[in-house]
Image: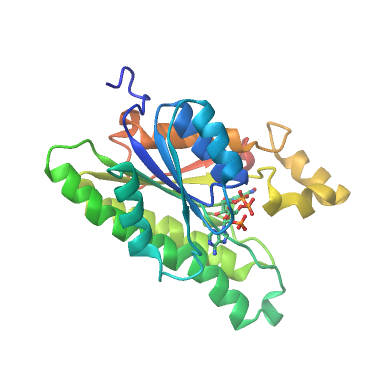
Amino acid sequence: MATTPFDLTGRTALVTGANTGIGQGIAIALAQAGADIAAVGRSPADGTAEQVRALGRRCELVSADLSSIEPVTEVVDTVVGKLGRLDILVNNAGIIRREDALDFSEEDWDAVMDTNLKTLFFLCQAAARHMTGWASQGGERGKIVNIASMLTFQGGIRVPSYTASKSGVGGLTKLMANEWAPRGINVNAIAPGYIATNNTAALQADETRNRQILERIPEQRWGDPADIGGASVFLASRAADYVQGHILAVDGGWLAR
Ligand code: NAP
C-alpha cells in the first residue's frame, strides 16, 4: 500500500527506450519509487533490468522496433500480460536527424516523425484504452508521461523534423489531457534540457559547443538521466493527480535565460 503521494508501490510502468540514457534513468527512478517495470525497445535492456531487479522490483523486457506503429497493440497487450496491469506509460524512445532545412530529406522527416510522434500517439492510445477500463473498475488513475524537448518551446537549428515532432508532442499531450482527464488518466510531458546521453555525445565532445551550452545553463552542468527520473516519478505519482497537460521543463534553468 502506498505510504506517500510519491510512492509507486504496486504500480506498473511501461518505459520505451529504457536500455540507455534518459529512459534508463526513468526506469530506475520509477523502480526506486516502488514500481515494476516493462522495458520496451529494440536494443536489449539487460543492464537496466539488472539495476531494477537489484532494487527488488520486477523488470520485464519486451523487444519492439518503434519506428512504426505495427508492434504497438501487441506491446501493450504483452506488458499487461506479463505484469498483470498497466498504470504508467513513459514515451521516451526518440531519434534526431541533423541537416540544413534547405537540404533536409523526406526520409529524415519521416523517420523522426514516425518514431517521435506517430508511435508515441498510438502507444498513448493503446495504453489509454487499457487504463480507462482499469479506472472505470475503481483502479488508480493512469499516468502518461511523454518526453518532449526544449524544441517543444524553441525552434532549434538544422533539426526540422525533430522540432516538428517535439512541438507535436507538446500539442498532443494537451489534447490527450483534455480528452482523458475525465476518464481517469493524467497526460503530461517532461521537456529535458541538455542531458548527458548518447544523443548528445557529439555536442559534449565539441569543445566550443560544450562551452556555449554550459555558459547558458544557470546550473552550470549537463543534466543527468536521474534528473529526469525524479520528474517522472512526480508525474507518475498521486502527487500529480491534479496536474494535466503540463510540459515540465527539467533544464537547469535553460529556458529561464
Ligand atoms: P539515447 O541515449 O539516444 O536514447 C534513445 C532511446 O530511444 C534508446 O533507448 C533507443 O534505442 C530508443 N529508440 C530510438 N529509436 C527506437 C526505435 N525505433 N525502437 C525502439 N527504441 C528506439 O537518447 P536520450 O538522450 O536518452 O533520449 C531519450 C529521449 O529524450 C528522446 O525522446 C530524446 O529526444 C529526448 N531528449 C533528450 C535530450 C538530451 O539532452 N539527451 C534532450 C531533450 C529530449 P537504441 O539504444 O536501440 O537506439
Looking at the picture, tell me which residue is in the foreground, 194 or 88. 88
Which image quarter is the N terminus in? Answer: top left
Query: Is residue 210 depicted above or below 64 in this figure?
Result: above
Measured as percent of width and height from the top left, residue 222 is found at 71, 38
Q: Quadrant of residue 151?
A: bottom right
Q: How many marks?
A: 0
| Residue that appears at 43% across and 40% down | 37
Judge from the rendering whether residue 126 lies leftward or rightward of residue 110; answer left or right.
Answer: left
| Residue that appears at 19% across and 45% down | 134
Judge from the rendering whether residue 92 lies leftward or rightward of residue 69; answer left or right.
Answer: right
User: Regarding ligand 1, which quadrant of the image does it lie in?
Assistant: bottom right
Looking at the picture, tell me which residue is in the foreground, 88 or 243. 88
| Residue that appears at 57% across and 70% down | 161
Measured as percent of width and height from the top left, residue 80 is found at 30, 49
Asked if one can make out residue 157 in the rendered structure from this viewpoint, the answer is: yes
Asked if one can make out residue 122 in the rendered structure from this viewpoint, the answer is: no
Looking at the picture, tell me which residue is in the foreground, 219 or 48. 48
Measured as percent of width and height from the top left, residue 43 is found at 59, 56
Query: Is residue 257 depicted above or below 68 in this figure?
Result: above
Measured as percent of width and height from the top left, residue 8 is found at 36, 29
The outermost residue toward the right is 207
| Residue that appears at 68% across and 64% down | 157
